[in-house]
Amino acid sequence: MDDKQLLDKIRSGQISAFDALYAKYSRSLMRYILHIVHDQASAEDIFHEAFIRVIKNLNLEFDRAKFSTWLFKVARNLAISSLRKNSRTDLDDAMDQYPGSSGSPIRIEDHEIIVEILKQISPAKREVFVLKQTQGFSYDEIAQILELPVGTVRSRLHACVKELQQLVKEQANELQ
């Protein structure tokens, strides 16, 4: 069942549809929030607040943007607000919990190595990478979430991948 159908069922009072929507996004949204705030308790609060916003905004129609794009943008904005309240303004420490991605075209078996390599990438590039590689968003969706032009998203991802390739080569040379 797609998001539009689930939202329609939620609007008509079917609680099980909300449970299905919640289950559909719980893992990926929580993982994304953890990338930003790097604190389990804060991430859980933000996660729940994002779903409260879903309930409060059931009247919204998602013709122009997909529901998932809207949900991730809400979660991102809440996470950034939380960081500002805690005087943390970037993503530098957020990658320690990077869970990897089974579908990622860049595969490194050692989790600690990928975390350390990703920490060396600028937060702006890293966030685009995380949204594309671990969450599977399209360029257009990432642009909407981050409120950036699509060209900027593509450019950041391209630069990130090139930088990652170089850092992986350097890491491989160090291990030899």
Image (tube, rainbow, N blue to C red):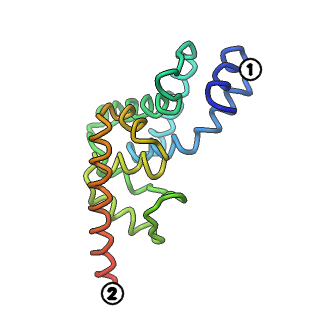
What residue is drawn where x is 40% and y is 57%? Answer: 96
Q: Hey, what amino acid is under mark 2? A: Gln
Please provide percent x and percent y for residue 31: 49, 46
Crowding near the residue tagged with mark 2, few <14, some 14–19, many ≥20 C-alpha atoms within 10 Å: few
Please provide percent x and percent y for residue 171: 31, 75
95 horizontally vs 149: left or right: right
Q: Is residue 144 above or below residue 11?
A: below
What residue is drawn where x is 27% and y is 43%? Answer: 90
What residue is drawn where x is 50% and y is 27%? Answer: 49
| Residue most extreme to the front | 151
24 horizontally vs 175: left or right: right
Q: Which mark is residue 14?
A: 1
Crowding near the residue tagged with mark 1, few <14, some 14–19, many ≥20 C-alpha atoms within 10 Å: few
Q: Nearer the viewer, residue 28 or 42?
A: 28
Q: Is residue 10 above or below residue 98?
A: above
Element class at badge 2: loop
Q: Is residue 100 above or below residue 26?
A: below
Element class at badge 1: loop
Q: Which mark is residue 102?
A: none
Q: Hey, what amino acid is under mark 1? A: Gln
Q: Nearer the viewer, residue 87 or 116?
A: 116
Q: Nearer the viewer, residue 4 or 37?
A: 4
What residue is drawn where x is 63% and y is 38%? Answer: 24
Q: Which mark is residue 176?
A: 2
Residue 1 appears in which quarter of the rendering?
Answer: top right
113 horizontally vs 169: left or right: right
Quote the CA–CA distance across marks 2 and 1. Answer: 58 Å
Q: Earlier in the sequence, mark 2 or mark 1?
A: 1
Please provide percent x and percent y for residue 72: 46, 34
| Residue most extreme to the bottom | 176
